[in-house]
Image: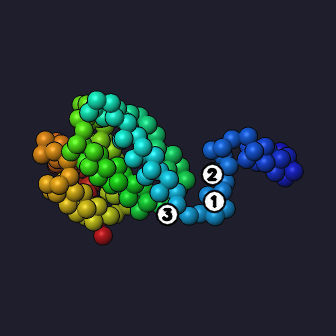
Amino acid sequence: MDKNQLVELILDVYCARKEAKEYFEFFLDPDVAKLQDKYEQAVSKEFNRVKRGYCKARISVLKNQLKEFASFQPGYEAEINLMLFVVRYALLVESHIHFPDTLLRGVAVIMRRLVEVANSNYVADTTLERLGAMLSDSKLGSRYFRRYLSDELASCLAEAAPDVKSR
């Protein structure tokens, strides 16, 4: 394709797809805080899907939100912050609403991914510190959920012990 054909294609995609428009607009004027706020609201909305005291959040939707956010390449700090937000929000909601086992396990998977991203970017120490503070806060989540996530974190760290990187 020549230059004119590429420009025409980009304009067609920009007009035809909302996702492409959002993607291009972010790269023309990158506002990570605004983007992160948008995805935090989407995560909050998903966790607030409740019926008769049971959380109906879909872990697949939460993982997809994280994946979409990462596709904008906002930087590892923003990705870590959003994953920490997911874990914290899950703890907040779970203290009042019953979570099915699949959602509990899904949040643990997101937490494991959080540790992987932090480790690969040499910020495991500060991220684990923040995560540990959340898991030890008795105001967040039930004792069962905090213990479950703490056990999963310990298991994750034991598996990755030789590879944990920090600055």
Q: Is residue 165 left or right of residue 135?
A: right
Bin the neighbour count of mark 3 within 10 Å (Cα to Cα): few under 14, some 14-19, many 20 and up: few
Q: Which one is earlier in the sequence, the residue at label 2 or at label 3?
A: 2
Q: Give the residue pinned by disc 2.
A: 23
Q: Nearer the viewer, residue 33 or 155?
A: 33
Q: Residue at x 52, y 57 (%)?
A: 35
Whether tag 1 and tag 2 are in contact, CB under 8 A, the answer is yes
In this rendering, is residue 35 above or below 109?
Answer: below
Q: Residue at x 12, y 46 (%)?
A: 143
Judge depth for marks 1 and 3 and give the one in front: 3
Tell me, for residue 33, which label it has, or none.
Answer: 3
State the image coordinates of residue 161 (x, y, percent, origin top left): 20, 53
Bin the neighbour count of mark 1 within 10 Å (Cα to Cα): few under 14, some 14-19, many 20 and up: few
Q: Is residue 159 visible?
A: no
Q: Secondary structure at mark 3?
A: helix
Q: For the residue marked with disc 2, what is the amino acid? A: Tyr
Q: Nearer the viewer, residue 82 or 113?
A: 82
Q: Residue at x 84, y 52 (%)?
A: 3
Q: Residue at x 40, y 54 (%)?
A: 82
Q: Secondary structure at mark 2?
A: helix
Q: Which one is earlier in the sequence, the residue at label 1 or at label 3?
A: 1
Q: For the residue marked with disc 1, what is the amino acid? A: Phe
**Quarter residue 152 falls in:** top left
Image quadrant for the N terminus? top right
Count up the numbered dots. 3
Tell me, for residue 27, which label it has, or none.
Answer: 1
Q: CA distance from mark 2 to mark 3?
A: 15 Å
Q: CA distance from mark 1 to mark 3?
A: 14 Å
Image quadrant for the C terminus? bottom left
Whether tag 1 and tag 3 are in contact, CB under 8 A, the answer is no
